[in-house]
Each structure stands twice: as C-alpha cells, then as structure tokens.
Amino acid sequence: MPRNKGSGKKRWTDSDDAPELTREFFRSGDVYKGEKLLRRGRPPTASQTKEAVKLRISPEVLDYYRSGGPGWQTRINATLERAVLREKRKAGG
C-alpha cells in the first residue's frame, strides 16, 4: 500500500521551548479563520470613549449604510460628527 506523504517521522518539539503566552501576546495576536482576519475584543481606547445608545433610525438610512459592508456604525458616527461641526460653524462656535 502506498504511504501518505505526511505519514513519515515527525520532528518532535519540546513544549518547554514554546514562548510564554502573556497577556500582551493575546492582546497583539491576529486570529484568522481561513484567509479572513477576525478581530476580537475592542481596539485600544482613545482619549474619549464612545457611549452606547439606543437610537431609532429609518430603514432607508440603515439599508444605505449597511450596504457599504462592515464598519457601517462607524460611518454613521462620522456623518453625525461632520453634521455637528457644520452646526457649530453655523452657530459661530
């Protein structure tokens, strides 16, 4: 019977030679599922953190932003930030 290519002798690796798994290791590690990068946890906090709120938004607006793919909530936030800046400029502040 033909032998599988992977069925030969495997090189033994001593588990004591493995690097120490520190918090920093897990914080900075990338996790992949196949070729797709999965992001876990929250990114490092900025000087000002965002606040979670419940907001009613029309289906048309949600469809528009969601159709742009991942990051739709961030894009909505950016649009609102620009609107706030315009209002502040109008008000002279």
Image: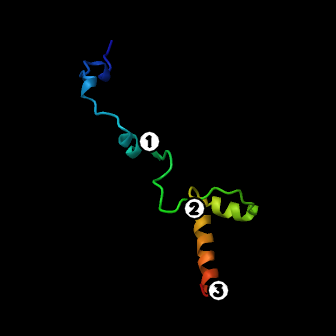
Which of these two is toward me, 73 or 49? 49
Task: Left or right? Give the position of 65 relative to 34.
Answer: right
| Amino acid carrying mark 2 in the image | Thr
| Amino acid carrying mark 1 in the image | Tyr
Front label number (1 vs 3): 3
Q: CA distance from mark 1 to mark 2?
A: 23 Å
Q: Residue at 67% across / 57% down in the picture? A: 53
Which of these two is toward me, 30 or 82? 82
Task: Left or right? Give the position of 31 relative to 88.
Answer: left
Crowd class of label 1 (few under 14; some 14 to 19; many from 20; radius 10 Å): few
Number of marks in the image?
A: 3
Task: Report x, y in % for residue 56.
Answer: 75, 60
Which element carries disc 3, helix, strand or loop?
helix
Q: Quadrant of the N terminus?
A: top left
Q: Which of the two discs, 1 and 3, labels the residue nearer the N terminus?
A: 1
Q: Residue at 71% across / 56% down in the picture? A: 54
Q: CA distance from mark 3 to mark 2?
A: 26 Å
User: Quadrant of residue 93 in the image?
Assistant: bottom right
Crowd class of label 3 (few under 14; some 14 to 19; many from 20; radius 10 Å): few
Front label number (1 vs 2): 2
Task: Report x, y in % for residue 86.
Answer: 61, 81
| Amino acid carrying mark 3 in the image | Ala
Q: Residue at 28% across / 30% down in the picture? A: 18
Which element carries disc 1, helix, strand or loop?
strand
Which residue matches tag 2?
Answer: 74
Which residue matches tag 3?
Answer: 91
Which residue matches tag 1?
Answer: 32
Q: Which of the two discs, 3 and 2, labels the residue nearer the N terminus?
A: 2
Q: CA distance from mark 1 to mark 3?
A: 48 Å
Front label number (3 vs 2): 3
Farthest top residue in view: 1
